[in-house]
Image (cartoon, grey):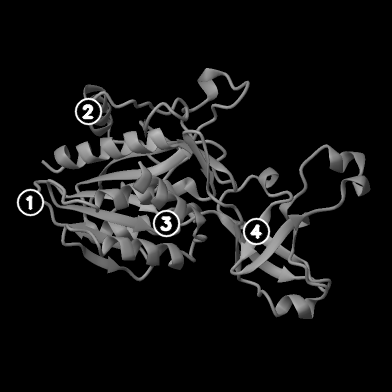
C-alpha cells in the first residue's frame, strides 16, 4: 500500500490541466522505463503514452488498460487594467468549489475572489455568482505588473497538498491520477500475458486522446481505470449515493457516454466475488469516461470500466479510500491474467 500511496501522492501534486499534461507525462515515462516487462513505449502526436508490456505468454486477445493523465482546471482568458485575471473552466467544475480557492499558474500563486458579501444585493446573496464574475488575484496592482507574471492562455491548477485522513486520502486530481498510479503498479512486474497501458490526454474536455490511442493499439478489449463520483455524504439517501467510498472498486454497466459490454461486466463482478474482493456498481446512469471514445474506435472495442469511488470529484479536495485502491489493484491483476485468454 505504501508504494501505491506514494505514487498517488506524487501524481496528485503534479499539475496537468487538459492539454498541458507534460509534467505528469514525464513522471509516468520515467516510471515505465523501470519496468522489468521490456516496455515498448511511444508518445503519440497528441501526447498519449502507449506502453506495451511483454508478458510471460502471448495473448489470444489484445488487452488495453487506460487511465487519463489530465485534470480539470482553469485557463486565463484576459488580464484587467487593475491586474486581476479573468478565466474560464477547463473541464466540468462546479462554481461553488471555486470561491476563495488557492490556485497556482506555474510558479505563480493566486486566489479566486468575488464581490465582497456585504456589497452583494439580496438577490446576489441567494445564488452562486457566475464564473464570469470571479477573478484570480495574483497580487498584481496593474495590467503591466500582471503581464510580467502571467499571460492569456496560461492555465491554473488548484493549489492543494495531498494528505491522509485515516484510511482515506485527500488531494486534487485524484480523477484520474488514481488510475495512473494503478496502471503504474501493473508495470512493476512481468504480467502473465502481453498487455498495453494507455495514459491518455484531454479526457476532461471531451475524451479527445482516448480514440486515437485506441486506434493505434486496436485492442479487442479495453478496461478503463478511472475515478467516479461517490455521493455518500450526509443526508443523501442510499439510492442516490451512486457508489460509496470504502466499498471496493466500481464496475459500471452504463453511464452517459457508454453502454458497457454486458458479458465483461458480469465476468468482472463474478471474478471479484469469487476472489473475495469487495466491489460495487453505480446505481445511477451518470458521468462518463474514455470508454465512450474507445468503444467506437475502428471496428469497435469491447469495453469495461473499473473505477475508484471518489467524493468531491473535480474539486481541490477529492477523497478516496486506500483500501479501495488496493482492492482495485488486486482485481486488475486478476483481470490481466484472464481477459487476454
Closer to the N terminus: mark 3 or mark 2? 3
Q: Residues within 10 Å of mark 4 (few under 14, many from 20)?
A: many
- Secondary structure beneath dot 1 equals loop
Q: Is residue 225 left or right of residue 302?
A: right
Q: Residue 292, can we see it? A: no
> Real-space Cα distance between discs 4 and 1?
47 Å
Which label is found at residue 322?
none
Closer to the N terminus: mark 3 or mark 4? 3
Q: Residue 21, can we see it? A: yes
> Real-space Cα distance between discs 1 and 2?
22 Å
Dot 3 and dot 1 residues touching (CB under 8 Å) = no
Quadrant in which the C terminus is drawn:
top left
- Secondary structure beneath dot 2 equals helix
Q: Is residue 257 left or right of residue 37?
A: right
Q: Residues within 10 Å of mark 1 (few under 14, many from 20)?
A: some
Q: Residue at x 77, y 78 (%)?
A: 145
Dot 3 and dot 2 residues touching (CB under 8 Å) = no
Residue at the spot of label 3? 69
| Viewer-nearest of discs 3 and 4 | 4
| Viewer-nearest of discs 4 and 1 | 4
Amino acid at each position: 500500500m505504501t508504494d501505491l500511496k506514494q505514487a498517488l501522492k506524487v501524481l496528485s501534486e503534479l499539475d496537468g490541466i487538459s492539454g498541458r499534461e507534460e509534467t505528469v507525462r514525464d513522471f509516468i515515462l520515467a516510471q515505465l522505463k523501470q519496468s522489468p516487462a521490456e516496455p515498448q513505449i511511444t508518445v503519440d502526436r497528441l501526447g498519449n503514452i502507449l506502453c506495451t508490456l511483454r508478458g510471460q505468454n502471448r495473448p489470444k486477445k489484445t488487452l488495453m488498460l487506460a487511465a487519463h493523465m489530465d485534470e480539470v482546471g482553469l485557463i486565463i482568458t484576459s488580464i484587467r487594467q487593475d491586474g486581476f485575471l479573468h478565466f474560464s473552466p477547463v473541464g466540468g467544475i462546479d462554481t461553488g468549489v471555486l470561491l476563495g480557492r488557492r490556485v497556482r499558474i506555474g510558479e505563480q500563486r493566486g486566489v479566486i475572489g468575488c464581490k465582497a458579501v456585504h456589497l452583494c444585493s439580496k438577490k446576489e446573496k441567494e445564488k452562486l455568482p457566475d464564473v464570469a464574475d470571479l477573478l484570480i488575484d495574483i497580487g498584481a496592482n496593474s495590467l503591466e505588473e500582471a503581464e510580467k507574471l502571467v499571460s492569456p492562455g496560461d492555465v491554473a491548477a488548484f493549489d492543494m497538498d495531498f494528505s491522509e485522513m485515516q484510511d482515506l486520502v485527500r488531494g486534487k486530481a485524484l480523477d484520474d491520477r488514481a488510475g495512473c498510479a494503478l496502471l503504474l503498479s501493473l508495470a512493476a512486474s512481468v504480467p502473465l500475458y502481453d498487455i498495453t497501458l494507455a495514459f491518455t490526454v484531454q479526457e476532461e474536455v471531451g475524451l479527445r486522446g482516448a480514440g486515437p490511442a485506441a486506434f493505434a493499439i486496436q485492442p479487442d478489449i479495453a478496461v478503463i481505470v478511472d475515478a467516479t463520483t461517490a455521493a455518500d455524504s450526509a443526508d443523501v439517501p442510499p439510492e442516490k449515493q451512486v457508489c460509496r467510498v470504502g466499498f471496493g472498486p466500481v464496475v459500471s454497466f452504463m453511464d452517459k457516454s457508454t453502454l458497457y459490454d454486458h458479458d465483461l461486466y458480469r465476468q468482472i463482478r463474478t471474478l471479484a466475488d469469487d476472489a473475495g474482493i469487495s466491489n460495487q456498481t453505480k446505481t445511477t446512469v451518470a458521468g462518463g469516461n474514455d470508454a465512450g471514445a474507445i468503444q467506437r474506435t475502428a471496428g469497435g472495442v469491447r469495453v469495461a470500466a473499473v473505477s475508484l469511488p471518489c467524493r468531491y470529484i473535480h474539486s481541490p479536495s477529492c477523497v478516496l479510500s486506500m483500501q479501495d485502491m488496493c482492492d482495485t489493484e488486486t482485481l486488475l491483476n486478476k483481470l490481466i491474467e484472464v481477459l487476454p485468454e
